[in-house]
Image: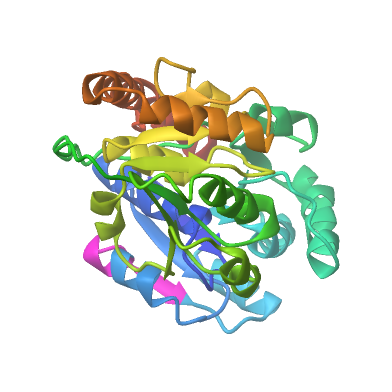
Amino acid sequence: MRNLVLFLDSSLFGGIESHIVELVKLMQSQKVPVSVLFYQDHQNRQLYDLLNSLNCPFQCLNGKALDLFHYLKQNDTCVVHTHGYKAGIIGRLTCKITGHTCISTYHAGEKGAGRIRVYNWLDHITSRFSQNLVVAEQLTNKVENSQFLANFIVPNNPQQKLPEKQLNIAFVGRLSYEKAPDRFIKLATHFQHQERLTFHLYGDGPMATELKKSAASNTIFHGHQTNNALWQEIDILVICSREEGLPMVLLEAIDNKILCVANTVGAIGTVINNNQTGLLTDDQSHNALVTKIKTVLFMSQQERNYLVKNATSQLHRFYAGKAQYAQLSKLYFS
């Protein structure tokens, strides 16, 4: 069996990094030799520590495109799986030259702005040089040689949380435009006189300063998180993104027995069925989210548990890695 090398350029911990950790767990469970290769060392201690805890070998290149060429010449039987636009562009072009099998995952469909927009354009132009995976089905029309692969998580099966009168509602993710934390702030402001609700933001990003200036007193900023302890503090997760694929944070929340409220964006609607496995809005308006939070307020603990139980069952059936491994192994080793 050929070695699998997961190639990325990573400076923060977000959806791609969570995906990498779950992919390593899945491959290890199937006895597939797997390692992680970073384009350069950004001192991403959170990810490095998680890889060390899994006994997964990793290595950092020096941030030059030729570094990957030399690495592959020394590892001529490996399969390369790229994640993110920079690693994707460099990985596909280099594998084309060296003759290595290259798989690329496209994690989101946003175009970005400025230099990011140029990188994303190059990322799509070079998609013809690899077999590609997309985490939202609508992206198959935008990416050449692509097939849909549902995101997944290796379940931890934590215990059901004990009921509390106070409800902690959370946003978990990067504080950037596409994730729409401003919508979450507006939602919190609407409920600032509802004593039963407290709103929490876990994460950091370019909008942090602006958001703090406009936040109501019922809103708490926790900053960037380096472990999974936050899930024990959350009762309701709100995903109010403008753009998404299938967010890993959604699967992590479900695995931690947390009720999810979300916009219909990206592939979220394939996981959340309204009033069955969570609460899903039919649009991205402020009023739609307000209505869903009001619904949560009037739900009993038994009703919330019903949605969480259904979501957990669906997670184990479709998003726990079994089907995804069958799909990936065909690309890696056939």
Quadrant of the image occupied by residue 134? top right
Write down the region rendered in magenta: 51-59
On screen, residue 139 versus residue 115, left or right, reads left
Q: Specify whether residue 266 is in view.
A: no
> Where does residue 71 sit, x and y in percent of width and height?
55, 72
299 shown above or below 130: above
On screen, residue 157 versus residue 196, left or right, reads left
Picture residue at 55% right of the left edge, 52% below the top: 189
On screen, residue 35 versus residue 122, left or right, reads left
Quadrant of the image occupied by residue 284? top right
> Where does residue 6 sit, x and y in percent of width and height?
49, 57
> Where does residue 106 sit, x and y in percent of width and height?
65, 45
Q: Specify whether residue 219 is in view.
A: yes
Frontmost residue, 2 versus 244: 244
Give the color scheme: rainbow, by chain, secondary structure or one colour: rainbow
Q: Quadrant of the N terminus?
A: top left
Would residue 31 be counted in the magenta stretch? no
Picture residue at 42% right of the left edge, 50% below the top: 170
